[in-house]
Image: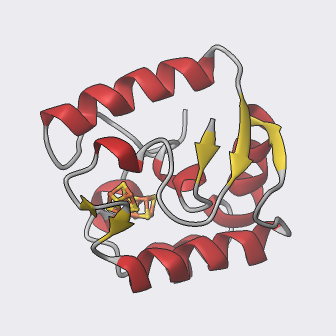
Amino acid sequence: MNLRPHHLLCIQKYTGHGYDENFTNHMDNTVDSLAEGCSVTLIEGCDDLCIACPNNIDGNCNSLDKVKQMDEAVLGACGLSYGMSSEWSKLANLARGKIFETSEFDKICYYCEWFELCNNTPII
Ligand code: SF4
Ligand code: SF4
């Protein structure tokens, strides 16, 4: 599966909320696939989650600058690069240790519209 880096965070904080029904249905399927064990490649730009998002306009996120910043911050905090591939569980654990369990979470996610919800959502 191709994922943009900040989606390593969003997927772990997902509680069924999203932009519309199509997006949340797709998110549900994605979370199920990852839970079954899945290799993930980190990509720049729209990914396998973005394909069902109403904010994806002709292959570009309409919050391009904000999400690009978050992607790069996640790469930096985790010591990852675009193009790297690994098991979902390893990447999820890395993001947990380097971001959710540190002050990086506030720094990276504070300006996201979902921050309050995610900040109150424990990682399972
Ligand atoms: S606050 Fe936004 S970017 Fe951060 S995990 Fe939640 S939805 Fe993703
Ligand atoms: S298109 Fe933008 S808002 Fe939608 S899932 Fe992708 S990064 Fe998030």
Horizontally, residue 43 falls left or right of residue 62, namely: right
Residue at coordinates 53% horizontally, 83% vertically from top-left? 69
The residue at the far left in this view is 20
Q: Residue 42 in the image: x percent, y percent? A: 70, 54
Horizontally, residue 20 falls left or right of residue 17, namely: left
Q: Residue 54 in the image: x percent, y percent? A: 19, 53
| Residue 11 or residue 123, whichever sits in front | 11
Q: Residue 64 in the image: x percent, y percent? A: 39, 78
Residue at coordinates 29% horizontally, 62% vertically from top-left? 114
Horizontally, residue 8 falls left or right of residue 10, namely: right
Q: Is residue 118 above or below residue 26?
A: below
Residue at coordinates 60% horizontally, 20% vertically from top-left? 35
> In which quadrant of the rendered view does residue 115 lie?
bottom left
Res 110 seen here? no
Specify how the rendered protein is coloured.
secondary structure
Horizontally, residue 80 falls left or right of residue 58, namely: right
Residue at coordinates 55% horizontally, 54% vertically from top-left? 9
Q: Quadrant of ligand 2?
A: bottom left
For the C terminus, the quadrant is: top right
Q: Residue 112 in the image: x percent, y percent? A: 34, 73
| Residue 62 or residue 24, whichever sits in front | 62
Q: Is residue 96 above or below residue 58?
A: above
The residue at the far top in this view is 36
Res 104 seen here? yes
For the N terminus, the quadrant is: top right
Q: Is residue 69 above or below residue 46?
A: below
Task: State the count of labels.
Answer: 0
